[in-house]
């Protein structure tokens, strides 16, 4: 059998056509490692195989998070070795592949040590390419025979001894059938599939061909699969179907020149045929560059696939030294070139012609040179700023140049990179320090640079969104803090909604910022953690907040605010991490009290309540305004008069304060003003009666009674005026407070020992002795506990803390018993219910 690296029967191979420039190379002696930039937790990738697949179904990418997988295509990219170099090819991925932020499109891009790779805009790596310490063993000795399955198909056996091997209707292996099997050949693609060697095993991968590649009847998807002895492979249909045969021979290095003629007894081996009488076609290897390059050769459609920049006789040299794109020469350089041409022409008259024109040419050259020098000065300054790492200056210079060249894509990229490198670290530092206003100011400067740079504007928007997220998290008290009703829900919904509108685009832009500013990666990762927690909390609490707000609005509109107590209590118990409910419940209590006093003629507390009325939640603010507008509350002028009289009262000008209230005691609010006037007159009288005993150490009972009658907010002058007297008898006051608390404790213990009031006693149709005794014990314990704590509060004794727990237990039991009785108002006779409630004591005590 005649064995050759080129096709027999005089058929020209791709290798012959390329002049031997595209011979397959042995395993390259390079170590290739990809180190993650934005997500170090993903780990580095070591590439040892001839072809490394990048795709969402490939390992290790299939194990990454959904935010990454959603941006990767199934057949995203391939990294491969060729001619002593490493290349990256994009396979038409949806979200693209970049090297050093430049898109990889049709032609594979050679990778160099230190390059930045980004897949899908979200997955960034730094390439580390170094010579291998030990030589690798070349793959060899593998012979793959593709024997036609059908004897009548008119096909020849294909023998593959060197890899990779491209299946293409434009390759000599198959194109020679274009006359005999033109129709069947049309089912093949120009880039149908390829076979390559991995660890001594042949693998086949479909190249997204139109009619597919099949192994044992199963169409190949995005994965390469191994080929085993005896399997059937079919290309594009049911005509080009082959049975795989695999043999392994010792590795034989081909001689210089790329071909070898096997010898038998010193003579070239004669061609032979196999037992099936089919001739053998020994296929030439194909360059990976041809396999993964989608650039078409001019005039050939996609029949001859040839990467740009590899038309020279040496593929290796072309790969290592790609053509340099030169800028068009300016006029000055053209003149210089013409002058040099004249001087080197060797013509006798050249010198004279030069001499006669030298002055004019020199003047023009000097003028043009000076013009070019000053014209290019901004660009030189920009390059100098970038070279010395002055990103802030480079950003300003690039922005100025964009004013003249607004459509210069490269200049926009330079401006974007410089601006981000200059400002993002400053912005990060301010966020870290909690200076959100300062961070906002930094972004305002970036926005100004983005006015002329459409490439920068969306990145600034992403930074503003991230800054808003961090501000919101900080305002809440951290990522674990509750979501506060009437405070957080609108901002949270806006932040999450913007992210959900186009998650993929936001991920790409944020990953791009991280590729420029590596330290941004940590903040990006932290922000995504905060976002995920926020999304989780929002999914639970935002619907609850919406329902609760609707309930509050509806009940206030119906003028039935009392109906809100139950749902607010239920929400607080059921959703402990729902923040702001305490404020809502306090506003409800204030609103109910003001509403109740406003509808009680002669109430003396209404003006005092209005003076202290402060609502923190929008529905009760609006409800209060509605009450005022409806005439249920005193006019603003009356409230102002009351405030003036109250301020005089607080300042100790009793006569002026009482006179002011007397002037208000007219009209519909006569009763309210008169009642408060009466209370203040009583305070003034008791204070005057207290004066004879002041300083004598006597009158403690009178002093304590007076102090207990004071409103700590309204009567602040009298609280201060008697503070010295109280402090002079501090020990006696503390002893009195301790006695009250001991009495409260004893009664509370007796109440508990004898058994609390139960349902059977509450529902009795009369007041039994048992109910009366237990009610008086509970009422007395509460009264003494409250009195004792009030006395403690007079002297601000630290010892009051030890009694707080007992006081709280007593008050909780008293409130529970009152609520239980009030729930029986439809069962008990009204007079009986009132008597039982009276035995429990004043509700406000």
Image (cartoon, rainbow, N blue to C red):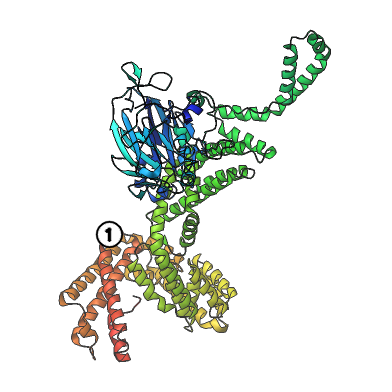
Q: Residue at x 44, y 76 (%)?
A: 593
- The C terminus appears in which quarter of the rendering? bottom left
Q: Residue at x 34, y 43 (%)?
A: 149
Residue 121 appears in the picture as rendered: no
**Residue toward you, 348 or 336:** 348
**Residue toward you, 203 or 393:** 203
Residue 28 appears in the picture as rendered: yes
Q: Position of residue 199 (x, y in %)?
A: 31, 33
Mark 1 lies on residue: 799
- The N terminus appears in which quarter of the rendering? top left
Left or right of residue 492: residue 201: left
**Residue toward you, 488 or 88:** 88
Position above or below: 300 against 675 = above
Residue at the far right: name it.
Answer: 356
Displayed quadrant of residue 759: bottom left
Position above or below: 657 against 415 = below
SS for callout 1 = helix
Residue at the far left: name it.
Answer: 753
Q: Position of residue 250 (x, y in %)?
A: 28, 25
Left or right of residue 202: residue 590: right
């Amino acid at each position: 059998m005649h064995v050759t690296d080129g096709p027999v029967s005089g058929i020209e191979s791709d290798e012959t056509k390329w002049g031997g420039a595209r011979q397959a190379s042995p395993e390259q002696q390079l170590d290739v490692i990809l180190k993650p930039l934005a997500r170090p937790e993903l780990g580095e990738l070591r590439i040892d195989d001839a072809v490394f697949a990048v795709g969402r179904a490939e390992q290790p990418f299939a194990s990454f998070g959904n935010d990454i997988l959603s941006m990767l295509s199934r057949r995203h990219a391939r990294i491969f070795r060729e001619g002593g170099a490493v290349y990256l090819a994009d396979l038409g991925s949806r979200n693209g592949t970049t090297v050093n932020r430049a898109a990889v499109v049709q032609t594979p891009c050679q990778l160099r040590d230190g390059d930045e790779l980004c897949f899908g805009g979200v997955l960034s790596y730094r390439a580390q390419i170094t010579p291998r310490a030990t030589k690798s063993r070349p793959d060899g000795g593998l012979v793959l025979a593709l024997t036609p399955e059908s004897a009548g198909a008119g096909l020849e056996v294909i023998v593959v001894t060197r890899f990779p091997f491209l299946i293409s209707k434009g390759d000599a292996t198959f194109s020679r059938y274009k006359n005999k099997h033109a129709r069947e050949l049309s089912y093949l693609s120009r880039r149908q599939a390829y076979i390559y060697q991995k660890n001594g095993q042949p693998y086949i991968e479909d190249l997204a061909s139109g009619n597919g590649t099949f192994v044992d009847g199963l169409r190949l998807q995005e994965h390469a699969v191994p080929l085993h002895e005896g399997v059937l492979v079919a290309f594009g249909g049911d005509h080009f179907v082959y049975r795989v045969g695999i043999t392994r021979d010792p590795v034989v290095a081909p001689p210089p020149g790329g071909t070898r003629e096997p010898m038998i007894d010193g003579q070239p081996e004669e061609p032979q045929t196999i037992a099936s009488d089919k001739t053998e076609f020994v296929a030439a290897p194909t360059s990976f560059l041809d396999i993964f390059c989608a650039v078409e050769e001019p005039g050939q459609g996609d029949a001859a696939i040839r990467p740009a920049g590899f038309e020279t006789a040496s593929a290796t040299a072309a790969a290592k030294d790609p053509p340099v794109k030169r800028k068009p020469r300016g006029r000055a350089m053209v003149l210089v070139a013409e002058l040099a041409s004249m001087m080197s022409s060797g013509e006798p008259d050249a010198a004279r012609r030069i001499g006669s024109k030298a002055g004019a040419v020199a003047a023009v050259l000097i003028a043009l040179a000076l013009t070019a020098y000053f014209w290019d000065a901004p660009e030189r300054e920009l390059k100098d700023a970038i070279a010395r790492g002055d990103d802030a200056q480079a950003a300003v210079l690039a922005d100025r140049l964009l004013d003249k060249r607004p459509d210069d894509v490269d200049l926009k990229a330079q401006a974007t990179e410089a601006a981000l490198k200059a400002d993002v670290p400053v912005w990060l530092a301010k966020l870290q320090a909690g200076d959100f206003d300062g961070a906002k100011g930094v972004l305002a400067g970036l926005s100004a640079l983005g006015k002329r740079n459409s490439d920068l504007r969306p990145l600034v928007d992403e930074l503003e969104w991230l800054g808003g997220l961090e501000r919101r998290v900080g305002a809440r008290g951290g990522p674990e803090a509750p979501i506060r009703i009437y405070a957080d829900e609108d901002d949270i919904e806006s932040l999450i909604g913007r992210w959900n509108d186009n998650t993929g685009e936001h991920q790409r832009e944020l990953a791009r910022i991280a590729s420029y500013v590596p330290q941004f990666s940590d903040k990006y990762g932290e922000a995504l953690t905060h976002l995920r927690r926020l999304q989780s909390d929002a999914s639970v609490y935002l619907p609850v907040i919406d329902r609760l707000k609707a309930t509050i609005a509806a009940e206030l509109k119906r003028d039935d605010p009392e109906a809100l107590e139950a749902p607010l209590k239920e929400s607080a118990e059921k959703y402990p991490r729902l923040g702001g409910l305490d404020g809502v419940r306090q506003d409800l209590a204030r609103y109910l009290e003001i509403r109740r006093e406003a509808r009680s003629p002669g109430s003396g507390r209404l003006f005092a309540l209005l003076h202290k009325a402060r609502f923190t939640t929008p529905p009760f603010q609006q409800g209060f305004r509605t009450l005022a507008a409806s005439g249920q509350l005193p006019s603003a002028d009356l409230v102002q008069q009351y405030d003036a009289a109250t301020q005089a009262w607080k300042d100790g000008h009793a006569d002026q304060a009482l006179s002011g209230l007397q002037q208000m005691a007219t009209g519909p609010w006569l009763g309210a003003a008169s009642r408060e006037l009466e209370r203040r007159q009583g305070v003034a009288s008791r204070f005057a009666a207290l004066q004879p005993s002041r300083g004598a150490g006597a009158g403690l009972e009178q002093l304590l009674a007076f102090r207990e009658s004071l409103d700590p907010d309204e009567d602040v002058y009298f609280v201060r005026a008697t503070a010295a007297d109280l402090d002079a008898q501090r020990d006696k006051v503390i002893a009195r407070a301790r006695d009250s608390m001991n009495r409260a404790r004893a009664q509370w213990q007796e109440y508990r020992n004898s058994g609390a009031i139960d349902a059977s006693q509450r529902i009795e149709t009369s007041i039994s002795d048992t109910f009366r005794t237990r009610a008086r014990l509970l009422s007395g314990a509460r009264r003494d506990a409250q009195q004792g704590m009030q006395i403690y509060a007079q002297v601000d004794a630290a010892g009051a803390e030890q009694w707080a727990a007992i006081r709280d237990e007593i008050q909780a039991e008293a409130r529970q018993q009152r609520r239980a009785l009030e729930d029986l108002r439809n069962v008990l006779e009204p007079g009986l219910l009132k008597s039982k409630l009276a035995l429990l004591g004043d509700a406000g005590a």
